[in-house]
Amino acid sequence: MSAAALLESSVEGIPVRRGKVRDIYDFGDRLLFVASDRISAFDWVLPTGIPDKGRVLTQLSHMWFDRLDVEHHLLSMQLDDLPLPEDADLEALEGRSMVVTKTNVVPVECVVRGYLSGSGWKEYQRDQSVCGIALPEGLTESDRLPDLIFTPATKAEEGHDINISFEQMIEIVGEDLSVQLRDLSLDIYRQGAEYALTKGIIIADTKFEFGIKDEQVLLIDEVLTPDSSRFWPQELYQPGQGQPSFDKQFVRDWLETTDWDKDSTPPGLPEDIVSQTRAKYIEAFELLVGDAFAWA
């Protein structure tokens, strides 16, 4: 096992905003994105972290930003490109940090679904639809959808993100931008899913975030990671049931076996769940990147 999980980073004297996973330091026109080892499930940050998880997310996002044909916010992976204070703990920040351009963040999450799983499967069983989009009869859990579907959601700092219709998205950000983000999201998913299949991974669904800088739309935050996507091993894929996964579904599944009510402080994760989750994240990284994880 690696060093202990980093639950919170520290860069003294720099304004910071902390999300569920990332600590975002403001350097004016640039930001320092630091991916901690925090893990969230059911919209709660769990008290137990997953060692090196932030490094997996950061290094995998770096690979995708380089590979995908899309404009994005990543400027550098080098910490010395920012005026960090002399006493900054560079070792703690190493491997989990990105220097990015500051954007005006679009307040809608762009979700693309290629397979019927999770909350989509639950809704389909009830209404034969996903996020209000009607689907054919007779689909089973984990089936590949006849066509990709775009299901936006409002972003929430606290509590649950809320699925919205495309029409509601238009009301929030306007029709032209909504159409542009929908088409861009579908294209990025196709690029990523096609590549992942060559590495033995099915990307069942994912979510993207976008920002705008000088009237240009940029892909921001993380991209196609085990935190923002469902990753399934292709060789074990079997429709009609839930799938083994490389993502935090493993943690969600464990939480479902407890008596946690999802409305109060969540329980800590046992050591074996932590170590198995870390191993799944690293395995996904090594399959997709084709190289050993440097902190394994």
Image (cartoon, rainbow, N blue to C red):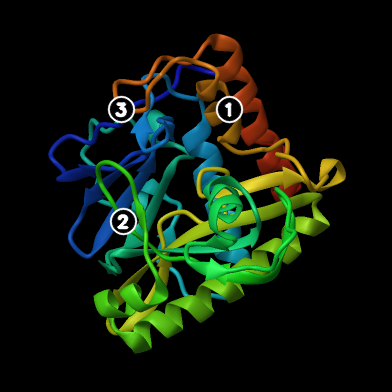
Disc assigned to residue 253: 1
How packed is label 1: few (under 14 Cα within 10 Å), some, or many (20 or more)?
A: few
Mark 2 touches mark 3? (CB < 8 Å): no
> Residue 101: percent from the left, percent from the top?
32, 65
Residue occupied by mark 2: 155
Q: Residue at the spot x=67%, y=54% of the render? A: 203
Cα distance between the residues tagged 1 and 3: 17 Å
Res. 33 in view: yes
Q: Residue at the spot x=30%, y=29% of the render? A: 8
Residue occupied by mark 3: 263
> What's the amino acid at mark 1?
Asp
Quarter of the image where one finds residue 286? top right
Instruction: Say which of 270 and 127 sits in front.
Output: 127
Quarter of the image where one finds residue 93? top left
Please indicate whether residue 242 sits to the left or right of residue 16 in the image.
right
Q: Residue at the spot x=78%, y=45% of the render? A: 240
Give the farthest residue toward the right: 235
> What's the amino acid at mark 3?
Asp
Mark 1 touches mark 3? (CB < 8 Å): no
Counting residues from the start of the chain, the first of labels 1 and 2 encountered is 2
How packed is label 3: few (under 14 Cα within 10 Å), some, or many (20 or more)?
A: few
Cα distance between the residues tagged 1 and 2: 24 Å
Counting residues from the start of the chain, the first of labels 1 and 3 encountered is 1
Question: For the N terminus, which image quadrant?
Answer: top right
How packed is label 2: few (under 14 Cα within 10 Å), some, or many (20 or more)?
A: some
Q: Is residue 62 positioned above or below 36 on the image? A: below
Question: For the C terminus, which image quadrant?
Answer: top right
> Residue 132: percent from the left, percent from the top?
48, 66
